[in-house]
């Protein structure tokens, strides 16, 4: 056979796809680009964005602790005592007494044997799933699970199967197929406790029943639930009375805990395994002293001030009720995350810009965070939003919603 003349080969420039990506610039030129806008004030219920004063209804500051003076002082004191960073991973030189104290406190708070703290919530799911799901195992996930769960599955050596969002018939179908295919390896069902965009909760009692019937374990990502879901705020497993039947729960410190980091809780032997096998833990620097101290103080407040949860749920129920009464499609929300379904991406960006111009900061959400054609404005509420602020939010949403034809 004749050999290929190397001089005639055309090679692909790997970076060419970057140069062809013009979508963001095109949206900027339309004046409705909604991302990466700098906030020029402390994060809170009112912020300055691009020099523009807004009511913030786009944060995950559910309990309003990010500006609490007690949390800030605990964080500052930790910097003064321990410095600004740990300069290493938890595996080697980056473990402080404070990290161990935090893990002990979290395990007790969550009602589990042990806890393990990671550098971020994203890394927690990434590192936990990828090290537990081996080549003979299967992980079953909800189609609307967070990206960090999806990426953890991609890194795992096992098989990944998805089921339709919160569809128990489809979950049963998937589990049946997995077992009928002579699959004798381990099976782990992983779901968000509260789904971060839609604001609905996993149907955990049914998920646990199905998992137990098919001899599968259950892992719940409670990033958007811990702090306010459940009698003491420890999440969806507590809310449904299933703490002992959920194998693993993960969480983050960047929402209710007002800091940065993440954690997983579960049986002591399982946490020991993750601690010695999770690459995301072993090869990442540990969370800073300031973050660990902030979380410890936030946990003190969560445990001693249940009125914050009560106020948050009052605000959430009010906004969900009033947005529904106005005629907005709030999908299936049942939490302080209240989406407004718009549909197309550019229409969603235009809606976002009009809200911003009227003093509301929200989050436009498009595919792949939601299915194509189901773009939405994600609003979320805190324990510290005042009645006056929420009055203004309702007023602006009603005004702009009518102008954009979303409501009549």
Image: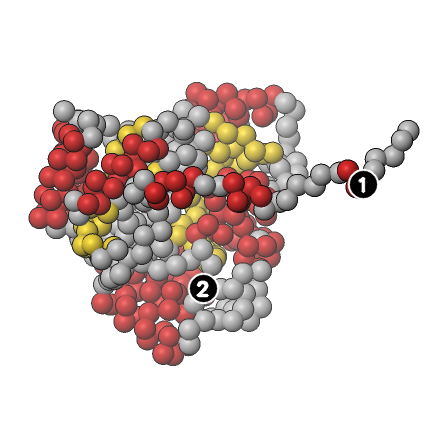
Q: Determine whether label 1 and label 2 are within 8 Å by CB.
A: no
Q: Earlier in the sequence, mark 1 or mark 2?
A: 1
Q: Is residue 201 above or below residue 408?
A: below
**Picture quarter with the N terminus:** top right
Residue 150 showing in the rendered view: yes
Q: Looking at the picture, tell me which residue is in the foreground, 352 or 88.
A: 352
- The x, y position of residue 243, in whole percent, is 39, 43
As drawn, which residue projects farthest toward the right? Answer: 1
- The x, y position of residue 398, in whole percent, is 13, 34
Q: 10 Å neighbourhood of mark 2: few (<14), some, or many (≥20)? A: many
- The x, y position of residue 339, in whole percent, is 27, 35
Classify residue 5 by image quadrant. top right
Q: Residue at x 37, y 27 (%)?
A: 373
Q: Nearer the viewer, mark 1 or mark 2?
A: 1
Classify residue 51 by image quadrant. bottom left
Q: Which residue is mark 2?
A: 287
């Amino acid at each position: 056979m004749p050999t290929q003349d190397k001089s005639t080969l055309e090679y692909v420039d790997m970076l060419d796809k970057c140069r062809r990506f013009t979508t963001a610039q095109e949206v900027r030129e339309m004046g409705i680009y909604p991302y990466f806008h700098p906030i020029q004030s402390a994060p809170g219920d009112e912020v300055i964005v691009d020099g523009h004063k807004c009511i913030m209804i786009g944060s995950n500051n559910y309990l309003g602790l990010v500006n609490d003076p007690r949390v800030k002082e605990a964080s500052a004191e930790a910097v003064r005592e321990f410095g600004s960073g740990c300069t290493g991973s938890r595996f080697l030189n980056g473990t402080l007494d404070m990290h161990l104290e935090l893990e002990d406190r979290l395990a007790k708070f969550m009602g589990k044997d042990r806890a393990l703290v990671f550098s971020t919530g994203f890394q927690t799911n990434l590192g936990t799933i990828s090290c537990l799901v081996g080549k003979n195992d299967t992980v079953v996930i909800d189609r609307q699970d967070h990206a960090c769960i999806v990426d953890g599955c991609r890194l795992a050596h096992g098989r990944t199967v998805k089921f339709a969002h919160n569809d128990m018939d489809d979950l049963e179908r998937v589990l049946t197929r997995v077992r009928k295919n002579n699959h004798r390896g381990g099976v782990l069902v992983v779901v968000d406790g509260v789904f971060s965009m839609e604001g609905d909760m996993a149907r955990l009692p049914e998920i646990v029943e199905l998992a137990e019937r098919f001899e599968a374990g259950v892992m719940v990502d409670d990033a958007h639930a811990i702090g306010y879901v459940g009698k003491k705020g420890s999440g969806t497993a507590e809310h449904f009375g299933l703490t002992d039947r959920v194998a693993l729960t993960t969480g983050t410190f960047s929402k209710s805990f007002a800091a940065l980091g993440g954690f997983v809780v579960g049986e002591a032997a399982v946490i020991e395994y993750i601690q010695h096998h999770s690459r995301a833990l072993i090869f990442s620097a540990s969370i800073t002293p300031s973050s660990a101290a902030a979380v410890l103080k936030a946990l003190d407040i969560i445990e001693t001030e249940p009125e914050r949860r009560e106020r948050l749920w009052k605000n959430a129920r009010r906004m969900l009720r009033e947005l529904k009464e106005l005629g907005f499609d709030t999908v299936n929300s049942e939490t302080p995350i209240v989406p407004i379904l718009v549909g197309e991406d550019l229409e969603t960006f235009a809606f976002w810009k009009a809200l911003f111009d009227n003093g509301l900061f929200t989050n436009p959400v498009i595919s792949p965070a939601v299915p194509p054609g189901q773009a939405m404005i994600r609003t979320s509420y805190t324990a510290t939003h005042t009645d006056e602020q929420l009055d203004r939010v309702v007023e602006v949403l009603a005004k702009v919603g009518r102008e954009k034809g979303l409501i009549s």
